Amino acid sequence: MAKLTITFGVVLIALGIFSFLITGHHYPTSLIPAGFGLLLAIFGALANSDDAKKRMLHMHIAVTIGLLGFLGTAKSIVDYIEMMQGRQFLFPAAVEEKAAMAVLLLIFVLLCVRSFINARRARA
């Protein structure tokens, strides 16, 4: 799971940087996914350890960050669907970026939860 966490971190960093460049360097808030990605990459690297306790701690921190990021951007999925149906938003690029971040983090959290359940079953 540590390598998967690093991968999701790199993808979020790329999303943030890409959005920042696309919006013409005018909106530093478009770098928020890069911040979450950096945190995920850091904790993924820390979880890449032989010590099971450290690995569990860092992965639980990473999934908590992912869950908080998803909860903060979840509404944007609905906004994106409404935008595709014709609703106008002041900053459509922001809606798209937040929706992409929400979907990525939802997938990450679900994969982590599945991994945690499988690990618990394997120990029992």
Image (cartoon, rainbow, N blue to C red):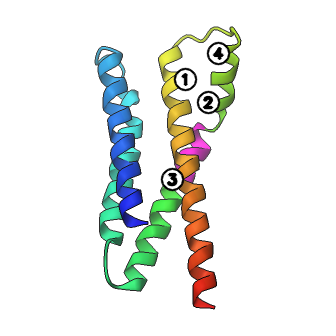
- Tell me what residue is drawn at x 31 percent, y 59 percent: 42
Q: Say if mark 4 contacts mark 3, CB within 8 Å.
A: no
Say which element carries label 2: helix
Front one among 73 and 1: 1
* Vertical comparison of 72 with 79: above or below: below
* Vertical comparison of 31 with 27: above or below: below
Say which element carries label 1: helix
Mark identifier at residue 66: 3
Mark identifier at residue 76: 2
Classify 10 Å Cα crowding around label 3: few (below 14), some (14-19), many (20 and above): many
State the separation of the CA atoms marked 1 and 3: 18 Å
* Vertical comparison of 120 with 47: above or below: below
Q: Position of residue 26 (x, y in %)?
A: 32, 16
Query: In terms of sequence position, does the residue under pointer 4 or pointer 2 come before the other?
Result: 2
Query: In terms of sequence position, does the residue under pointer 3 or pointer 2 come before the other?
Result: 3
Query: In terms of sequence position, does the residue under pointer 1 or pointer 4 come before the other?
Result: 4
Q: Which residues are magenta?
A: 66-73
State the separation of the CA atoms marked 4 and 3: 25 Å
- Label 1, on which residue? 95
Query: In terms of sequence position, does the residue under pointer 4 or pointer 3 come before the other?
Result: 3
Say which element carries label 3: helix
Q: Position of residue 94 (x, y in %)?
A: 49, 22
Q: Say if mark 2 contacts mark 1, CB within 8 Å.
A: yes
The answer to whether residue 108 is magenta is no
Q: Say if mark 3 contacts mark 2, CB within 8 Å.
A: no
Q: Say if mark 1 contacts mark 3, CB within 8 Å.
A: no
State the separation of the CA atoms marked 4 and 2: 10 Å
Q: What kind of residue is marked 2?
A: Ser
Q: Say if mark 1 contacts mark 4, CB within 8 Å.
A: yes
- Label 4, on which residue? 83
Say which element carries label 4: helix
